Image (spheres, rainbow, N blue to C red):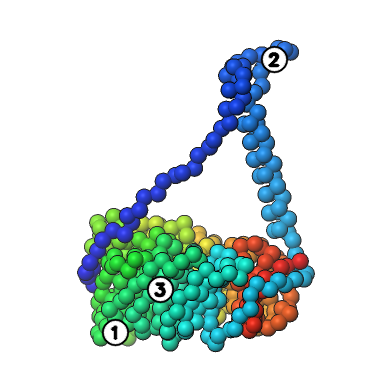
Amino acid sequence: MAIIRFRNPNGNSYYDTDGAQYDNAARRGSSRAAYAFDEEDEDGGAGLPRNRSVLRALLIAGVAAILIFIIRAELQGRVYSGASYNKIADVISQEGARYIALGDAVVTCSRDGASCMDTGGKMIWNIPFEMQQPVIDVSGQVLAVCDLGGSTIYILNSRQELGRVNTNLPVRAIRVSESGEVAAVLEDTDITWIYLYDQNGETIAYFKTTMAQSGYPVSMAISPDGEVVGVAHLTMGNSSIGSSIAFYNFGSVGQNSVENNVSGYNYSDEIFPYFTYLGNGSCAAVSDSRIVFFKGEEIPQSAANAMFSAQLEGVYSDGKHIALLFPDTSGEEDHSLRIYNDEGQLVVTIPFTLDFTNIQLVGDRVVINSDQECLIYNLSGVRKYRGTFRDDVIAVIPSQSPGKLTIVTKTTIEQMILE
């Protein structure tokens, strides 16, 4: 394997703009304010600060912190038994369309294009295109979409189109970072290329893989800053298959490594079709017998493993947690959802029964739904809601508020308010 071209994508600087302002009105109004900490009061005790604006600010901050704690505690313990609905907009649903949450905005992506709508039903942007089989990836507030086998990648957020990438070869897979970089697997005749682009469509780096040398890429992960790319390759031995997981750092650290390959691991008799970053410099790869966690922002290292023998039914992630779905072996429920944090620790196991169409991890919530019914749990395993929709739904989009969902039916987009 050889790196063909390289440049450092991390060209931005970030500055801490946090600051504090203080009201000096007390000082301007009285010369005593400058000596308030040194003087004694009429009773002979230590003097009190005369800067009332500072005291007022501290008092308000303290009260606000207490209120936030009370509200969070109430929401954490609250269980909902019903729901009301507010219509946001009328829609004509398209076959095969996907509805995706970007913050509190809703993105609709179909074969004919993509559009974004705010919570009030106002159209933010609309981008027409023609695709046979849209491939979509989301990271944080950034979405990338392309046609399987196509050559154009659209990079979007809830406000605008960030950029487009035009490739010179058919696209087989894409992964997008939170900062807008895109890693793409491109098909050639006897070679598979992996390209890394910035959101303006410029090439950051690219390298080739072959079955004989490194194996065939089956999954990828890209760090939130777009600097590190992990690739899980399928490898072939004399009479067995295996996997090789390699990490490439295209920042300054990777320049000191051969071909920017900063770490790698081999696994016999396993294939890793799912690979994702979880934040805090960690990522996870899943095979049919284990989940392995890697830790390290610049040079990922193997950190934890969890083996399993049950049949894996699905993998879900929100960029902070990752969940594995298995049959419930107790026989009491149909499914068992095991949720891990970015340290590789098992947070909770949620058994449930529902002929579901989707499972979503959103902050401290787990939303499970079919077209007629919805289950919501917290990460303590407490069921917060179970109920039916008033109409058949096409998509359920959890909002930032724990008591609200956006519901898409065949004719409307509605806000569902839990009660």
Left or right relative to 233: residue 96: right
Q: What residue is drawn where x is 59% and y is 75%? A: 359
Label 1: few (<14), some (14–19) or many (≥20) C-alpha neighbours in 10 Å = few
**Residue 61 at least partly seen:** yes
Instruction: Name the residue that disc number 3 marks.
Output: 154
Instruction: Name the residue that disc number 2 marks.
Output: 41
Instruction: Name the residue that disc number 1 marks.
Output: 238
Q: What residue is drawn where x is 29% and y is 84%? A: 238
Q: Quadrant of the C terminus?
A: bottom right
Which image quarter: residue 385?
bottom right
Of labels 3 and 2, earlier in sequence is 2
Q: What residue is drawn where x is 64% and y is 23%? A: 50
Q: What residue is drawn where x is 66% and y is 14%? A: 40
Which image quarter: residue 249?
bottom left
Q: Position of residue 89 (x, y in %)?
A: 63, 75
Of labels 1 and 3, earlier in sequence is 3
Foreground of the two, 389 or 230: 389
